[in-house]
Amino acid sequence: MRFTKISVLLLLAVIPAIMIFFAFRFKNPAPLTLSKGTRIAMIGNNLGARMIHYDNLETELQLRFPAYELFIRNMCDAGKHPASGRIRAAFLLSLSRAPRSTR
């Protein structure tokens, strides 16, 4: 009986505590390195989609790192309509299946 109490205690308290401790340890991220011609793609939701109209971030990056010749692509989408993702996916799929002209 005592063995089962210890095993239940381990399952309910000690093991999750250890998992939480190791899950939230701070890790230093690797520094971001830029090289000439670096491509930056921003993928996100409405916060990034608003930056399409006010391109302060892209301008600031180009002004701070002119020698790097950065290529910045903002692919954020607000997702205003529930079906917009399906319609967009169908449109992109139709483009990929469209016959290409050969020269």
Image (tube, rainbow, N blue to C red):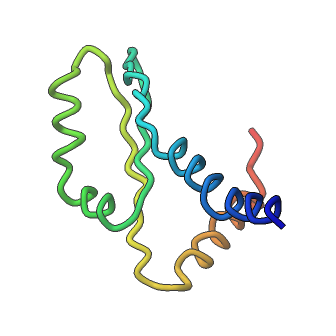
> Residue 60 appears at what percent x and percent y?
16, 35
Front residue of 1/29: it is 1
The residue positioned 22% from the left and 60% from the top of the image is: 53
Name which quarter of the figure residue 35 lies in. top left
Q: How many marks?
A: 0
> Residue 4 appears at what percent x and percent y?
81, 64
Q: Is residue 102 left or right of residue 31?
A: right
> Residue 49 appears at what percent x and percent y?
32, 62
The residue positioned 38% from the left and 15% from the top of the image is: 36
The residue positioned 50% from the left and 45% from the top of the image is: 21
Name which quarter of the figure residue 57 lies in. top left
Front residue of 16/90: it is 16
> Residue 62 appears at what percent x and percent y?
22, 29
Q: Is residue 31 left or right of residue 22?
A: left
Name which quarter of the figure residue 58 lies in. top left
Q: Is residue 18 left or right of residue 69?
A: right
Front residue of 6/75: it is 6
In this rendering, the answer to whether 24 lies above or below 68 is below
